[in-house]
Image (cartoon, rainbow, N blue to C red):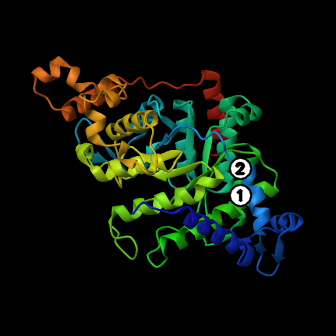
Amino acid sequence: MLELLHHEAENITEYALDILEKEGCVYNSGNALSLLSYHGCRIEEKTSRVYIPAQKMKEALRKFSNNNLPHIKLISGYAHLFLDIIDKKRKQGTIEDIKKIIVFASQTKNVEVVSTGIEPENARGDAQKILACDLLLRYTQKAFLVEPCSPQCAQSIIDMASIVSGTSEALQKNPRIYGIVELDTPFCYSSSNLALLDLYAKNKQTICLKSSYGYTSSIHPKGLIALQMAEWFAGIFYLSAMEYSCPLCIQLPFFPFGAKSGYYQCLLDYISYQCKALSALEKFLLPTSTPIIPTLGLGFLSGWMLSLQRSALKAFNASYFSDAGKNEPATFSPLHLLIEDECVSYLNEITSCKESIQGFSPDKMFSSSSPSTARLWSSSIFHYEMKDLWRKKKATWQDYIKEYTINRWNALKIEPVISSSTLGSLDKFLHDSGF
C-alpha cells in the first residue's frame, strides 16, 4: 500500500510539469498575463491561459525550497460543533468556548497554528472570519489560521494583525497569518485568488496553497496528485514572478468521511494517497500540511490504523498535522488536541523511515517495560503507571487523561494577551470598518 518507487515519484512530478507546459493554467488578470509573459511563458490572451516551460517552473520551485524543514507541528482543527468535556455533550459553541479553545491551544506545546476550533455564533461569510481573527489576535500570540476569504477581508485581517504587532514591518518580521488560498475552478487562478496571493505575499505572511481537486473517484491517485501538483506549482510560479519572498505551505485535501468510491474504499487508500503525495513533493522540500484522521474517541489508543497514519506521515516528512483536535468530522474536542500534542512529541523524538514505519505504535508509546521508548513520553500526564493514587483507585488511563484535561480546562485564565491601548486601537479599527 505505502510503497512508491523513486521513479514513480519522478514520473508524477514530470506529469505535473508537462501539464503546465502543454495544457497551461488560467490567470484571470491582465497584469498577471503581462508579468508571466515577461518571465518566458507563452500566453493565450483570449482564454487568459498561460503555458509555463518546465525548466522555468523548476527554477521557480528552487526559490521556495526549505532546506531546514522543522519537526512536525500541529494546526488545530476547525469544526461545526464543540464537544463539552465536562457534560460530554456536543453543542454549538459560544464565544466564551472559542476563547477557551484559543487559550488552551496556545498553551499546547506543538500547536504552531491556532484556529478558533468552532465557528463563531451569529456571523457568516467575511464577518465570521473577521470575528474569528479578532478573537485570535486578542487571546493568542501564536500564528493563526485564516480560511479562504475575499481580498477585502484579508486586507482587514492584515491591518488588524499589524495593529497588534505594532507596525506592518513588525508583522512581516514575525508572520502571524496562515492564509489558505483555494482554487474554486480547476486550473484557474481567479482575480480573487491572485489578489490574495499578492496581499499575503507582499506582507510576508504564510500562504497555504490548496488545489481545487479533492479525492476524485474517477482519477487514479497518481494522476490526481499530478493534477494537484500542477495547480500548486502554478501558484508558486506566479509568486516567483512577482519576486515575493514569503513562507509557503502545501495543503493536502481533507478526508471525505463516509465516502467509498472508485480508488478509495477504505482509510488505507486515503493514507496511501497521502504518502504518495508527500513522496512526490519531497524532492522540492516544500512544507506540507496533511490532515490527520480524527481519533473518534479514546479508542484511538489501540487503533492501529491511526497509529499507522501518523507514523507514515512522519516517515514521509509531513511538516504539519492539520485538523488536530477533531474527534470526529464535525466536532472539536480539547481532549483530543491534547492527545495529538503528546503523539507529536513522541514522533519528534523517534527516528522513523519509510522502510520501518512500525516505529510508532500504541504498545511502544505506553509501555514502561521498554527503556528505549519509555523515556520519550516526557510529559508527566502520561506517566500513568507511576501514579500510585490512580492505581489505588483502580482508575483507567482514560479516566486519568479525562480528569487531567477537565482540570486544565477549568483552570484556564481567559485574559487578552495584548495591552489595553492595543485593544482600544483594535476596537476603533473594527468600529470604523463597520464590524
Instruction: Specify few, some or many for label 1: CA neighbours under 10 Å numbering under 14, 14-19, or 20 or more.
Output: many
Disc 1/disc 2 C-alpha distance (Å)? 8 Å
Q: Residue 280 is drawn in which quadrant?
A: bottom right
Q: Position of residue 65 (x, y in %)?
A: 69, 48
The answer to whether the residues at label 1 and label 2 have Cβ atoms under 8 Å apart is yes
Residue 21 picture location, percent across and down: 74, 73
Position of 44 compared to 264: left or right?
right
- 328 above or below 158? below
Q: Quadrant of residue 234?
A: bottom right
Viewer can see residue 402:
yes
Instruction: Tell me which numbered mark, 1 or 2, is placed earlier along the sequence.
Output: 2
Percent across and percent down for residue 399 are 19, 32
Residue at left offset 34%, top offset 42%: 333
Identify residue for label 1.
236
At mark 1, the secondary structure is helix
Element type at mark 2: loop
Q: Within the image, what quadrant is residue 411 found in?
A: top left
